[in-house]
Image: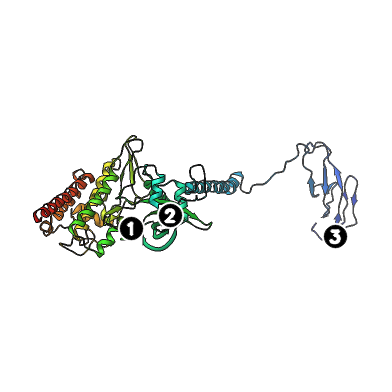
Amino acid sequence: MFPGEDYISQCNTTNTSIQNGQRASVIQTRPLQNEVNHINAAEFVLDESNWCCDSQEMCNLKLLSQKTLPPIGRPETTGPSYPGGIAVWLAGVVLPLTLVVLTLVGLSVYLSRRRKDRDMMNSAEGGENEPMILPPGSIRDLLDMTTSGSGSGLPLLVQRSIARQITLLETIGKGRFGEVWRGRWRSENVAVKIFSTRDERSWFREVEIYQTVMLRHDNILGFIAADNKDNGTWTQLWLVTDFHEKGSLFDYLMEHTVDPYTLSKMALTVSNGMAHLHMEIVGTQGKPAIAHRDLKSRNVLVKSDLTCAIADLGLAVRYDSTTRSIDIPPNSHVGTKRYLSPEILDGSIAMHQFDSFKRADMYALGLVLWELCRRCSLVADEYQLPYFNVVAPDPSMEEMKQIVCDKKLRPPIPDSWHKACPELVALSRVMAECWYENPAARLTALRVKKTISAIGNERSSQSDSSSDVKA
């Protein structure tokens, strides 16, 4: 039989009979025998459908659509579904969330440490944060009253108070880490070096070096104060120092020549400042030995009396002889390429030996002395930087290595210098001994200081003798 055709048949069930030759619609339940699936009291439920009946007894038993109830036993438990499995769910959801949390925690720790460093200037002895009322007088008076001979600068609260009372007047220069301004505190000019927050480590390092006990010296730039200016949207990091209106030695030599006496005085004060940096002072109020690592004419300032002061200690390293440890700043800068010594250029410098850094300073000092001698009024050559005739204005490390290490060139010393005056003769010899290829053969800062000092003493003796003869 086919669906849709009439038929004449009789289909018997246990309690129902269908006949009269028509489609059958059967809706009934039939008790199951216990032996079927061994389930008691279960039922087959017959869907409402059309069925074709055959001519046999109980023929519709094979054709009935059946639905069985689930077996009697422990009920199925329901829970969250994980598309692709629990492992995929963990990798796709839990792992990214964990990474986000760890990132936030790391960022929080980093910002907390930065805030702690900046707050170094926000606290003083006793935990005070507000600027104090300063007594009348100059910065020199405050230094005399508050430092008690320690030579480490003003107390933090005094520094903060001074910095908050400074008015910025004009920009006077730009450096590697920020701008330099002329400012006014009361009636005094001060220099304000302003660092951006991205150079916070450099600011912190330079402040740390300037506040070294017993560092204050006539031939080292005078440190006054450090502070951070935070208005909620941006932060400026201030380093306040003495102001010298004549600017750097580079600027001064560009515009002026120097007579032999001034030449000797400038050379002596630069070497005197380097000797103080390099020297270790032992004692309870002692000073560690310090190497500059970026000595050049731009980092030497000319004072009003034409003596010099060494500035910019941001790359300096300190040596603690008690622990034999070298305190190296945490940045990748190595100084100005033009002034780098041969052992730095070729990578042979012994970083674990502090004397290596001092000897590299002496090489740079020899180049600064050459710049000075070139502008002596008795020879009056045009001002030029060292190696001006063999490298570009902004040479690369490879260029400098080729000139200094491979070709072993040094700035020229003209014959005219050996005939001009005793100062040029002596300084020509000194500078040549400062830039030896072998670092151990170079003069020390103390030896240079004594040699140049002897030149000045000899000239003074000659002047006194001449005066006696005239009399």
| SS for dot 2 | strand
Sequence-wise, which precedes: disc 1 or disc 3?
3
| SS for dot 3 | loop
Sequence-wise, which precedes: disc 2 or disc 3?
3
Quarter occupied by the N terminus: bottom right
Q: Mark 1 points at which residue?
A: 244
Inter-mark Cα distance, 2 to 3: 105 Å
Q: What amino acid is found at the position of numbered circle 2 in the picture?
A: Trp
Q: What amino acid is found at the position of numbered circle 3 in the picture?
A: Asp
Give whichever of 70, 207 is nearer the camera: 207
Q: Which residue lies furthest to the top in this view?
A: 322
Can residue 214 be seen from the camera position used here?
yes
Q: Mark 2 points at which residue?
A: 238
Sequence-wise, which precedes: disc 2 or disc 1?
2
**Picture layout, residue 310 above or below residue 73:** below
Inter-mark Cα distance, 2 to 1: 17 Å
Instruction: Report the mark closest to the observer, 1 or 3.
Output: 1
Can residue 117 be seen from the camera position used here?
no
Inter-mark Cα distance, 1 to 3: 121 Å
